[in-house]
Amino acid sequence: MRIFSGIQPTGRKHLGNYIGAIVQYVAGQERGEAIYCIVDLHALTVPFEPAELPVLVYDTAAILLAAGLDPERCILFRQSDVREHSELTWLLTAVTAKGDLERMTQFKDKSARQRELVTAGLFFYPVLMAADVLAYRTHEVPVGDDQRQHLELMRDIAIRFNSRFGEQLVVPEARIPEVGARIMDLQDPTSKMSTTSGSEEGRVYVLDEPAEIERKFKRAVTDSGSGIRRASDKPGISNLIDILAAVRATTPEQVEAEFADSGYGDFKAAVAAAVTAYLAPVRERYNELRPDEARLEEILAAGAERARAIASATVADVRGAMGVGAPR
Ligand code: ATP
Ligand code: MG
Protein backbone atom coordinates (compact mmCIF):
# COMPACT_ATOMS: atom_id res chain seq x y z
CA MET A 1 0.00 0.00 0.00
CA ARG A 2 1.31 3.43 -0.91
CA ILE A 3 0.73 6.47 1.32
CA PHE A 4 1.34 10.06 0.22
CA SER A 5 0.78 13.45 1.80
CA GLY A 6 2.02 17.00 1.37
CA ILE A 7 2.59 19.77 3.87
CA GLN A 8 3.16 23.47 3.23
CA PRO A 9 6.35 25.26 4.20
CA THR A 10 4.33 28.38 5.04
CA GLY A 11 5.33 29.55 8.50
CA ARG A 12 5.79 27.40 11.55
CA LYS A 13 3.66 24.30 11.89
CA HIS A 14 0.93 24.32 14.56
CA LEU A 15 -0.78 21.82 16.82
CA GLY A 16 -3.55 21.23 14.25
CA ASN A 17 -0.99 20.22 11.61
CA TYR A 18 0.75 18.04 14.15
CA ILE A 19 -2.29 16.15 15.42
CA GLY A 20 -4.29 16.16 12.17
CA ALA A 21 -1.49 15.21 9.82
CA ILE A 22 2.08 14.75 11.11
CA VAL A 23 1.22 12.05 13.68
CA GLN A 24 -0.46 10.11 10.86
CA TYR A 25 2.62 10.53 8.66
CA VAL A 26 4.79 8.93 11.31
CA ALA A 27 2.35 6.04 11.74
CA GLY A 28 2.19 5.60 7.95
CA GLN A 29 5.82 4.49 7.91
CA GLU A 30 4.69 1.28 9.64
CA ARG A 31 1.67 0.76 7.46
CA GLY A 32 2.98 1.01 3.93
CA GLU A 33 5.34 2.70 1.48
CA ALA A 34 5.20 6.25 2.81
CA ILE A 35 5.99 9.32 0.69
CA TYR A 36 5.89 12.86 2.13
CA CYS A 37 6.42 16.08 0.31
CA ILE A 38 7.10 19.65 1.42
CA VAL A 39 4.95 21.53 -1.03
CA ASP A 40 6.86 24.71 -1.81
CA LEU A 41 4.94 25.17 -5.06
CA HIS A 42 1.68 25.34 -3.10
CA ALA A 43 3.24 28.08 -0.99
CA LEU A 44 3.37 30.31 -4.10
CA THR A 45 -0.42 30.57 -4.11
CA VAL A 46 -0.47 33.18 -1.31
CA PRO A 47 1.98 36.07 -0.64
CA PHE A 48 5.52 34.79 0.08
CA GLU A 49 9.12 36.01 0.28
CA PRO A 50 11.58 34.38 -2.16
CA ALA A 51 14.46 34.64 0.32
CA GLU A 52 12.42 32.97 3.06
CA LEU A 53 11.01 30.05 1.11
CA PRO A 54 14.10 27.79 1.16
CA VAL A 55 14.53 28.53 4.87
CA LEU A 56 10.93 27.57 5.61
CA VAL A 57 11.41 24.32 3.70
CA TYR A 58 14.32 23.45 6.04
CA ASP A 59 12.26 24.45 9.09
CA THR A 60 9.45 22.16 7.96
CA ALA A 61 11.80 19.29 7.10
CA ALA A 62 13.40 19.51 10.55
CA ILE A 63 9.98 19.49 12.25
CA LEU A 64 8.95 16.38 10.31
CA LEU A 65 12.21 14.58 11.14
CA ALA A 66 11.93 15.65 14.78
CA ALA A 67 8.38 14.25 14.87
CA GLY A 68 9.70 10.85 13.81
CA LEU A 69 9.93 10.68 10.03
CA ASP A 70 12.87 8.45 9.22
CA PRO A 71 14.49 8.79 5.77
CA GLU A 72 15.24 5.07 5.94
CA ARG A 73 11.57 4.26 6.23
CA CYS A 74 9.92 6.94 4.10
CA ILE A 75 10.60 9.19 1.15
CA LEU A 76 10.78 12.85 2.21
CA PHE A 77 11.35 15.45 -0.49
CA ARG A 78 10.77 19.00 -1.72
CA GLN A 79 7.94 19.23 -4.24
CA SER A 80 9.72 21.56 -6.68
CA ASP A 81 12.64 19.12 -7.00
CA VAL A 82 10.36 16.71 -8.86
CA ARG A 83 9.26 18.63 -11.97
CA GLU A 84 6.76 15.91 -12.85
CA HIS A 85 4.31 17.46 -10.34
CA SER A 86 4.08 20.60 -12.47
CA GLU A 87 3.72 18.76 -15.75
CA LEU A 88 1.05 16.43 -14.40
CA THR A 89 -0.88 19.41 -13.05
CA TRP A 90 -1.26 20.78 -16.55
CA LEU A 91 -2.19 17.38 -18.01
CA LEU A 92 -4.87 16.94 -15.33
CA THR A 93 -6.46 20.30 -16.07
CA ALA A 94 -7.86 18.54 -19.15
CA VAL A 95 -10.06 16.40 -16.88
CA THR A 96 -10.82 19.00 -14.20
CA ALA A 97 -14.11 20.91 -14.23
CA LYS A 98 -13.75 24.66 -13.74
CA GLY A 99 -17.09 24.63 -11.92
CA ASP A 100 -15.69 22.17 -9.38
CA LEU A 101 -12.71 24.44 -8.67
CA GLU A 102 -15.11 27.35 -8.17
CA ARG A 103 -16.95 25.38 -5.50
CA MET A 104 -13.86 24.69 -3.35
CA THR A 105 -14.37 26.25 0.07
CA GLN A 106 -10.62 26.72 0.63
CA PHE A 107 -10.44 28.82 -2.55
CA LYS A 108 -13.48 30.84 -1.51
CA ASP A 109 -12.13 31.44 2.02
CA LYS A 110 -8.56 32.24 1.04
CA SER A 111 -9.50 34.44 -1.93
CA ALA A 112 -11.97 36.40 0.20
CA ARG A 113 -9.19 37.11 2.72
CA GLN A 114 -6.67 38.15 0.05
CA ARG A 115 -6.16 41.92 0.13
CA GLU A 116 -4.00 42.19 -2.98
CA LEU A 117 -3.68 39.68 -5.78
CA VAL A 118 -5.93 36.62 -5.87
CA THR A 119 -3.64 34.41 -7.94
CA ALA A 120 -4.67 31.86 -10.53
CA GLY A 121 -2.42 29.52 -8.52
CA LEU A 122 -4.83 29.73 -5.58
CA PHE A 123 -7.60 28.66 -7.94
CA PHE A 124 -5.55 25.76 -9.38
CA TYR A 125 -4.22 24.65 -5.98
CA PRO A 126 -6.46 21.53 -5.88
CA VAL A 127 -5.21 20.40 -9.32
CA LEU A 128 -1.58 20.64 -8.18
CA MET A 129 -2.58 18.69 -5.07
CA ALA A 130 -4.27 16.05 -7.25
CA ALA A 131 -1.08 15.79 -9.32
CA ASP A 132 1.02 15.38 -6.14
CA VAL A 133 -1.03 12.40 -5.02
CA LEU A 134 -1.88 10.81 -8.36
CA ALA A 135 1.76 10.92 -9.59
CA TYR A 136 2.53 8.21 -7.02
CA ARG A 137 -0.52 6.03 -7.71
CA THR A 138 -1.29 6.56 -4.04
CA HIS A 139 -3.79 4.42 -2.15
CA GLU A 140 -4.12 6.46 1.02
CA VAL A 141 -3.74 10.15 1.86
CA PRO A 142 -3.43 11.12 5.54
CA VAL A 143 -4.89 14.64 5.95
CA GLY A 144 -6.93 16.78 8.31
CA ASP A 145 -10.66 17.25 7.90
CA ASP A 146 -10.23 20.52 5.97
CA GLN A 147 -8.82 18.56 3.01
CA ARG A 148 -11.88 16.32 2.58
CA GLN A 149 -13.25 18.36 -0.34
CA HIS A 150 -9.89 18.42 -2.14
CA LEU A 151 -9.64 14.65 -1.76
CA GLU A 152 -13.10 14.20 -3.27
CA LEU A 153 -12.09 16.40 -6.19
CA MET A 154 -8.88 14.45 -6.88
CA ARG A 155 -10.87 11.21 -6.82
CA ASP A 156 -13.24 12.69 -9.41
CA ILE A 157 -10.25 13.77 -11.51
CA ALA A 158 -8.72 10.27 -11.38
CA ILE A 159 -12.05 8.61 -12.23
CA ARG A 160 -12.65 10.98 -15.15
CA PHE A 161 -9.11 10.44 -16.41
CA ASN A 162 -9.43 6.66 -16.25
CA SER A 163 -12.77 6.58 -18.02
CA ARG A 164 -11.60 8.93 -20.77
CA PHE A 165 -8.02 7.67 -21.34
CA GLY A 166 -7.90 4.17 -19.84
CA GLU A 167 -7.09 2.85 -16.36
CA GLN A 168 -3.84 4.61 -15.51
CA LEU A 169 -4.44 6.28 -12.17
CA VAL A 170 -5.22 4.91 -8.71
CA VAL A 171 -8.28 6.51 -7.07
CA PRO A 172 -6.99 7.43 -3.58
CA GLU A 173 -8.77 7.26 -0.22
CA ALA A 174 -8.50 9.96 2.44
CA ARG A 175 -7.29 8.89 5.88
CA ILE A 176 -8.68 11.36 8.38
CA PRO A 177 -8.07 10.81 12.11
CA GLU A 178 -11.09 10.06 14.33
CA VAL A 179 -10.02 12.49 17.03
CA GLY A 180 -8.23 15.74 16.22
CA ALA A 181 -9.02 15.97 12.52
CA ARG A 182 -10.10 19.56 13.00
CA ILE A 183 -8.31 21.40 15.79
CA MET A 184 -9.90 24.81 16.22
CA ASP A 185 -8.33 28.23 16.78
CA LEU A 186 -8.05 28.90 20.54
CA GLN A 187 -9.27 32.47 20.10
CA ASP A 188 -12.01 31.64 17.60
CA PRO A 189 -13.11 28.05 18.18
CA THR A 190 -15.54 28.17 15.25
CA SER A 191 -12.61 28.39 12.77
CA LYS A 192 -9.89 25.78 12.26
CA MET A 193 -6.44 26.53 13.60
CA SER A 194 -4.71 27.80 10.47
CA THR A 195 -1.32 29.03 9.35
CA THR A 196 -2.64 31.84 7.18
CA SER A 197 -5.69 33.06 9.10
CA GLY A 198 -6.56 33.68 12.74
CA SER A 199 -4.29 35.27 15.34
CA GLU A 200 -0.93 34.30 16.86
CA GLU A 201 -2.69 33.81 20.20
CA GLY A 202 -5.14 31.33 18.71
CA ARG A 203 -2.39 29.07 17.37
CA VAL A 204 -0.13 26.78 19.38
CA TYR A 205 3.08 26.14 17.48
CA VAL A 206 4.92 22.83 17.67
CA LEU A 207 8.02 24.84 18.65
CA ASP A 208 6.39 27.08 21.27
CA GLU A 209 8.12 27.33 24.65
CA PRO A 210 6.19 25.81 27.61
CA ALA A 211 5.36 29.28 28.99
CA GLU A 212 3.80 30.31 25.67
CA ILE A 213 1.76 27.12 25.48
CA GLU A 214 0.51 27.67 29.01
CA ARG A 215 -0.43 31.29 28.30
CA LYS A 216 -2.30 30.46 25.08
CA PHE A 217 -4.39 27.74 26.74
CA LYS A 218 -5.08 29.93 29.76
CA ARG A 219 -6.47 32.62 27.46
CA ALA A 220 -8.35 30.17 25.23
CA VAL A 221 -11.89 31.39 24.53
CA THR A 222 -14.58 29.33 26.26
CA ASP A 223 -18.28 29.85 26.95
CA SER A 224 -19.62 31.46 30.11
CA GLY A 225 -21.20 28.26 31.42
CA SER A 226 -19.55 25.37 33.23
CA GLY A 227 -19.07 21.66 32.70
CA ILE A 228 -16.36 19.84 30.77
CA ARG A 229 -18.46 18.29 28.02
CA ARG A 230 -18.74 18.56 24.27
CA ALA A 231 -21.71 20.46 22.89
CA SER A 232 -22.46 22.54 19.81
CA ASP A 233 -22.85 25.64 22.00
CA LYS A 234 -19.48 24.92 23.67
CA PRO A 235 -17.01 24.99 20.75
CA GLY A 236 -14.10 26.19 22.91
CA ILE A 237 -14.40 23.46 25.56
CA SER A 238 -15.18 20.85 22.89
CA ASN A 239 -11.94 21.77 21.13
CA LEU A 240 -9.89 21.49 24.33
CA ILE A 241 -11.45 18.07 25.03
CA ASP A 242 -10.47 16.89 21.54
CA ILE A 243 -6.94 18.23 21.94
CA LEU A 244 -6.44 16.43 25.25
CA ALA A 245 -7.92 13.21 23.88
CA ALA A 246 -5.64 13.33 20.83
CA VAL A 247 -2.52 14.14 22.83
CA ARG A 248 -3.20 11.35 25.32
CA ALA A 249 -4.33 8.92 22.59
CA THR A 250 -7.61 8.38 24.41
CA THR A 251 -11.26 9.23 23.65
CA PRO A 252 -13.18 12.47 24.25
CA GLU A 253 -15.63 10.46 26.39
CA GLN A 254 -12.82 9.43 28.73
CA VAL A 255 -11.64 13.02 29.04
CA GLU A 256 -15.21 14.13 29.88
CA ALA A 257 -15.51 11.42 32.52
CA GLU A 258 -12.17 12.28 34.11
CA PHE A 259 -12.90 16.02 34.31
CA ALA A 260 -16.62 15.76 35.15
CA ASP A 261 -16.13 17.63 38.44
CA SER A 262 -13.48 20.10 37.26
CA GLY A 263 -13.76 23.80 36.54
CA TYR A 264 -12.55 25.49 33.36
CA GLY A 265 -9.36 26.81 34.96
CA ASP A 266 -8.12 23.42 36.16
CA PHE A 267 -9.08 21.79 32.90
CA LYS A 268 -7.21 24.35 30.80
CA ALA A 269 -4.13 23.89 32.99
CA ALA A 270 -4.31 20.12 32.50
CA VAL A 271 -4.56 20.52 28.70
CA ALA A 272 -1.62 22.95 28.68
CA ALA A 273 0.52 20.57 30.75
CA ALA A 274 -0.30 17.60 28.52
CA VAL A 275 0.44 19.53 25.31
CA THR A 276 3.70 20.88 26.74
CA ALA A 277 4.89 17.38 27.64
CA TYR A 278 3.75 16.09 24.25
CA LEU A 279 5.65 18.68 22.22
CA ALA A 280 8.79 19.04 24.36
CA PRO A 281 10.71 16.10 22.85
CA VAL A 282 9.86 17.31 19.33
CA ARG A 283 11.20 20.78 20.10
CA GLU A 284 14.39 19.30 21.55
CA ARG A 285 15.05 17.11 18.53
CA TYR A 286 14.24 20.03 16.23
CA ASN A 287 16.89 22.14 17.92
CA GLU A 288 19.42 19.37 17.32
CA LEU A 289 18.50 18.77 13.67
CA ARG A 290 17.74 22.23 12.34
CA PRO A 291 21.29 23.70 12.31
CA ASP A 292 22.67 21.02 9.95
CA GLU A 293 21.27 22.35 6.68
CA ALA A 294 23.69 20.29 4.58
CA ARG A 295 22.25 17.13 6.13
CA LEU A 296 18.67 18.34 5.60
CA GLU A 297 19.45 19.09 1.96
CA GLU A 298 21.03 15.66 1.55
CA ILE A 299 17.90 13.96 2.90
CA LEU A 300 15.60 16.02 0.64
CA ALA A 301 17.79 15.42 -2.43
CA ALA A 302 17.94 11.66 -1.86
CA GLY A 303 14.16 11.65 -1.33
CA ALA A 304 13.60 13.60 -4.55
CA GLU A 305 15.60 11.10 -6.53
CA ARG A 306 13.50 8.20 -5.27
CA ALA A 307 10.27 10.16 -5.75
CA ARG A 308 11.21 11.14 -9.31
CA ALA A 309 11.68 7.50 -10.30
CA ILE A 310 8.04 6.80 -9.38
CA ALA A 311 6.48 10.03 -10.65
CA SER A 312 8.28 10.01 -14.01
CA ALA A 313 6.90 6.56 -14.81
CA THR A 314 3.35 7.73 -14.07
CA VAL A 315 3.73 10.91 -16.11
CA ALA A 316 5.14 8.92 -19.06
CA ASP A 317 2.07 6.65 -18.92
CA VAL A 318 -0.29 9.63 -18.64
CA ARG A 319 1.35 11.39 -21.59
CA GLY A 320 1.14 8.21 -23.64
CA ALA A 321 -2.51 7.62 -22.76
CA MET A 322 -3.37 11.21 -23.68
CA GLY A 323 -1.42 11.17 -26.94
CA VAL A 324 0.95 13.88 -25.74
CA GLY A 325 4.45 13.79 -27.24
CA ALA A 326 5.93 11.51 -29.87
CA PRO A 327 4.00 8.21 -30.35
CA ARG A 328 5.28 5.43 -28.09
P1 ATP B 1 -3.40 27.04 5.71
O1 ATP B 1 -4.41 27.29 6.78
O2 ATP B 1 -2.70 28.24 5.23
O3 ATP B 1 -3.94 26.19 4.56
P2 ATP B 1 -2.52 24.86 7.19
O4 ATP B 1 -2.39 25.23 8.62
O5 ATP B 1 -3.75 24.18 6.72
O6 ATP B 1 -2.26 26.16 6.36
P3 ATP B 1 -1.12 22.94 5.58
O7 ATP B 1 0.32 22.73 5.35
O8 ATP B 1 -1.99 23.42 4.47
O9 ATP B 1 -1.25 23.97 6.81
O10 ATP B 1 -1.75 21.60 6.16
C1 ATP B 1 -0.96 20.44 6.44
C2 ATP B 1 -1.85 19.36 6.98
O11 ATP B 1 -2.40 19.75 8.24
C3 ATP B 1 -3.05 19.03 6.08
O12 ATP B 1 -3.19 17.62 6.03
C4 ATP B 1 -4.23 19.64 6.80
O13 ATP B 1 -5.42 18.93 6.55
C5 ATP B 1 -3.80 19.52 8.25
N1 ATP B 1 -4.42 20.54 9.08
C6 ATP B 1 -4.36 21.87 8.88
N2 ATP B 1 -5.01 22.54 9.84
C7 ATP B 1 -5.53 21.60 10.68
C8 ATP B 1 -6.31 21.68 11.86
N3 ATP B 1 -6.69 22.84 12.37
N4 ATP B 1 -6.66 20.51 12.48
C9 ATP B 1 -6.27 19.31 11.96
N5 ATP B 1 -5.53 19.19 10.84
C10 ATP B 1 -5.16 20.31 10.19
MG1 MG C 1 -4.06 24.02 4.54
Image: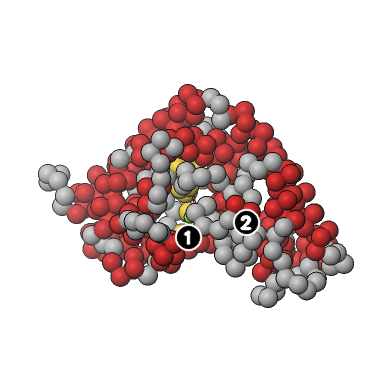
The quarter in which the C terminus is drawn is: top left
Side (left or right) of 325 relative to 250? left
Which residue has dot 1 on it? 147
Task: Give the spatial CA distance, label 1 vs label 2.
Answer: 21 Å
Please state which of residues 115 and 28 is positioned toward the viewer in this rendering.
Answer: 115
**Amino acid at pointer 2:** Gly
**Mark 1 Cβ and ligand 1 under 8 Å apart:** yes
Work out whether 287 lies above or below 97. Answer: above
Please state which of residues 139 and 199 is positioned toward the viewer in this rendering.
Answer: 199
| N-term-proximal mark, 1 vs 2 | 1
SS for callout 1: helix
Residue 143 visible, this orientation = no
Please state which of residues 191 and 23 is positioned toward the viewer in this rendering.
Answer: 191
Quarter residue 309 falls in: top left
Please state which of residues 326 and 202 is positioned toward the viewer in this rendering.
Answer: 202
Residue visible at 25% across and 52% down in the picture? 90
Residue 266 position, x and y percent, is 83, 58
Q: Which mark is residue 202?
A: 2
Residue visible at 67% across and 33% down in the picture? 284
**Mark 2 Cβ and ligand 1 under 8 Å apart:** no
Residue 16 position, x and y percent, is 59, 54
Work out whether 57 lies above or below 146. Answer: above
Work out whether 53 lies above or below 2. Answer: above
Quarter residue 114 falls in: bottom left
Q: Residue furthest right?
A: 261
SS for callout 2: helix
Residue 238 visible, this orientation = yes
**Amino acid at pointer 1:** Gln
Q: Residues within 10 Å of mark 1 (few under 14, many from 20)?
A: some
Q: Residue furthest bottom?
A: 233
Residue 258 position, x and y percent, is 83, 62
Residue 165 position, x and y percent, is 23, 59
